[in-house]
Image (cartoon, helix red, strand yellow):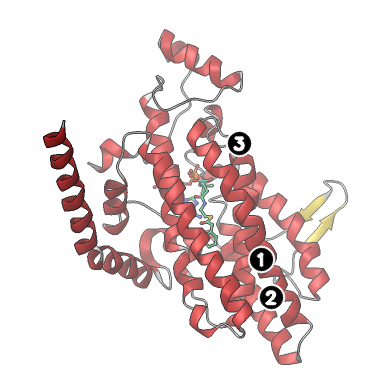
Amino acid sequence: MYAQVINTGSDRVRRIDEMSAEEQAFMERIENGEKIEPKEWMPEGYRKTLIRQIGQHAHSEVVGQLPEGNWITRAPTLERKAILLAKVQDEAGHGLYLYCAAETLGVSRDELIELLNSGKMKYSSIFNYPTLNWADIGAVGWLVDGAAIMNQVPLQRTSYGPYSRAMIRICKEESFHQRQGYDIMMKMCAGSPEQKAMAQDALNRFWYPALMMFGPSDKDSVHSAQSMAWKIKINTNDELRQKFVDQTVPQAEYLGLTVPDEHLKWNEERGAYDFSEPDWSEFFDVIAGNGPCNKERLGARVKAWDDGAWFREGLAVNAQKKQTKQRKQA
Ligand code: FAQ
């Protein structure tokens, strides 16, 4: 079933002479900036790539609730608790929009969740790192949501209509998420030396995992070229990572924090920062299931799914009853 639903492995960009007339017309529409809508013809590879990317994105939103959800009961004030609660609820909503967008491609939400729960489908590497203290909640909002926005703003222009429309709503909410994270960091950095040290420690631990969110370097990205030809992706992984570094370093400086990279340096010629690459062996290890929290995160999702079985059964029985009643009345 996995192979039927999502594609993995290396994508080779299809040449024009390999394309059917239908596919050539499709490419013309993409190049003209037209949106592709659910019932329209699309190449099978395009459909599978979208299911893989949107599905992985939806799973990330839902699994992404766990590291922050962990701190709702321990937020330092009632106001912070209310804000965090709202943010975590937003992530559930994002998952919902994205599962709905994926469903328009002919895959059910249940199928996607089964693929996540069986470890066959990925979610973002970042959520396999622990949130150890309150400063981490600031760092997650600032860096993780900041990286998510950097990636998602261009995706508002993605070629598949339902995905692009979901992204417009999601980006609005992500901006608030990033601001609330930065606000926590500002408070911590203006606090006691111990609080500032906590903020620095959180930045130290989340900096490289945040850089990894953009995916492997362009030379190792197997899907980028074809995804960009289809305008499913708008930028390469390295382009977005660079933009994120350029935007975030001045924010760290404003906080009085040090980015944990001794090679970080403004490059006058490029008009951009030179920076150290993350440890890619760690990244590949985390996405292979061996990160610090992979087992815990997936275990929590599987338990939530199993615990909700009675509710899903109840809904199905109720829907069936309604249908039978409607049929009798007709
Ligand atoms: N983690 O060829 P590429 C959020 C996989 S935001 C795990 O470059 P692609 C908000 C990739 O799937 C986070 N796996 O792949 C939030 C592929 O493996 P496959 C989610 C990764 O797809 C904030 C392989 O490596 N955002 O959740 C990662 O062209 C706070 C080769 O990579 C999105 O999903 C990774 N970081 O580019 C929620 C955005 N990177 O599938 C709660 C949409 C790569 O062949 C709290 N997605 N891989 O087995 C994208 O833009 C793209 O899918 C990329 C990867 C850029 C993530």
Q: Which mark is residue 327?
A: none
Q: Is residue 274 visible?
A: no
Q: Amino acid at mark 3?
A: Ile
| Residue in view at x 61 percent, y 34 percent | 157
Residue 189 falls in image quadrant? bottom right
> Which quadrant does the N terminus fall into?
top left
Q: Secondary structure at mark 1?
A: helix
16 or 316: nearer the eye? 316
Residue at numbered disc 3: 234
In the picture provided, is 24 more to the left or to the right than 244?
left
For marks 3 and 1 on the same chain, the one whose residue lies earlier in the sequence: 1
Q: CA distance from mark 3 to mark 1?
A: 23 Å
Residue at numbered disc 1: 142
Residue 41 falls in image quadrant? top left
> Given the current orientation, which residue lies at the most extreme top position?
21
125 or 112: nearer the eye? 112
For marks 3 and 2 on the same chain, the one whose residue lies earlier in the sequence: 2
Q: Amino acid at mark 2?
A: Ile
In the picture provided, is 325 more to the left or to the right than 171?
left
Q: Nearer the viewer, mark 1 or mark 2?
A: 2
User: x, y (%) of residue 102?
Assistant: 39, 40
| Residue in view at x 31 percent, y 69 percent | 299
In the picture provided, is 60 more to the left or to the right than 147?
left
> Given the current orientation, which residue lies at the most extreme front position?
329
Q: Which mark is residue 184?
A: 2
